[in-house]
Amino acid sequence: MPPASHRPERLHRSELAVPATNPRFFAKAAASAADVVFLDLEDAVAPHAKDEARANAVAALNEVDWGGKTMAVRVNGLDTPWAHRDIVDVARLAPRLDLILLPKAGSGFDVRFVDQLLTLIERETGRPTQIGIEVLIETAMGVANAEAIAQGSPRLEAMIFGVGDYTVDMRTYDDVFGLPSPRYAVLTGNAHGGARERHWNDQWHFAMARIANACRAYGLRPVDGPYTDFRDAEGYRASAQRAAALGFEGKWAIHPSQIELANEAFSPTPAQREWAARIAKLIEDTNRTGQGAVGDDGVLVDMAHLKQARQIARRQALIERMAAGA
């Protein structure tokens, strides 16, 4: 697999879902602060409207000014009658397309199959830029094969945790996707006869950690999926912060009100930027004396901290370049 440096560098803090059956949303999505927009041909579209949605997506990609946004189309799954035409039509007819978003990826073969289709279309059309792939990991099989999927194709750029369909596949019967379950909890002991406290756990930690680790191992962007109660800004923010703490670098927004929350959660804070600048200078000054580590207000910092500081600086530089339209 190629290293991450061979893949396009894209800002992916927020990914806005836009049903392709609703063209009135396209201009608002284009004017939004979302880093990535995907036009949805799958779950947001009824079976009888699939052809109309596909045509709308192609027209929107060709006719709307999307600026510097990364543009994706979520096609229907490979086990449906619409997948082949979805991929072929949007890839052949929409030069503005950046990414195919493949749902329910279950194996490395799924990614390789889409890669081969795109390769043939690019040869046929003479397309000058390569179309990338992002996949939804939203089934038990997908989580079980996360590492193999991550190695599926050099086109693959990102893996998204699809908590909605994963909830269905795991048969947990939660009706609001993205929320923690009060059932996934234990009671503290009662050895001394006192009040027992209820201790909540995170039922999706295993799946999210495995996806994040697979992405970082193979140079992909890990992105968290939906939080469907779009009225709950506090809950969304907490969900995004949890994902960021696990190493994810973005999250879906299923409503425009969630975009700024995602952008904030996956951007370096002022305190982090200040720390990064200070630590970089401190370690670089220390290196000139022949030392690799130094104390910083009672905390030992070394070359690992310098790597961290440089990652924060690179992240902030990418955000500023995108904001400037570069």
Image: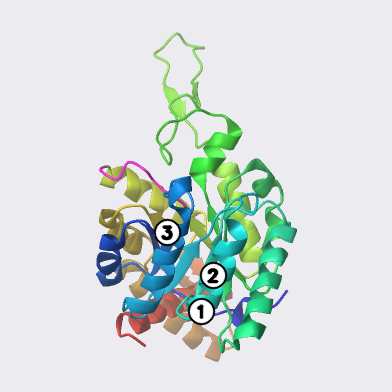
Q: Residue at x 47, y 68 (%)?
A: 72
> Which mark is in front, 1 or 2?
2
Residue where numbered disc 1 is placed? 9
> Looking at the image, which is closer to me, 107 or 51?
51
Q: Earlier in the sequence, mark 1 or mark 2?
A: 1
Helix or strand or loop: what does disc 2 sit on? helix
Q: Secondary structure at mark 3?
A: helix
Mark 3 sits on what residue? 53
**Amino acid type assigned to the residue bearing label 3 in the image:** Ala
Compare residues 308 and 202 and report the one nearer the observer: 202
Picture quadrant of residue 154: bottom right
Quadrant of the image containing the N terminus = bottom right
Q: Position of 32 compared to 287: left or right?
A: left
Residue 226 magenta = yes
Asked if residue 186 is positioned above or below residue 212 in the image, the reply reads above
Q: Secondary structure at mark 1?
A: loop
Relative side of 25 to 137, left or right: left
What percent of the width, then of the height, locates residue 195?
39, 14
In the rendered image, the quadrant that contains the C terminus is bottom left
Q: Residue 266 at what x, y percent from top left?
A: 39, 63
Q: What are the residue bounds of the magenta stretch?
A: 225-231
Q: Which mark is residue 89?
A: 2
Mark 1 and mark 3: span between their CA atoms?
A: 29 Å
Q: How many marks?
A: 3
Nearest the camera: 188 or 293? 188
- Whole-angstrom CA distance, mark 2 to mark 3, is 12 Å
Where is residue 86 shown, x and y percent of the image?
55, 63
Identify the residue at image location x=47%, y=11%.
192
What's the residue at 71%, 72% (across, down)?
A: 116
Amino acid at dot 2? Asp
Residue 310 location, x and y as percent?
A: 48, 79
Compared to residue 294, the image places residue 40 above or below, namely above
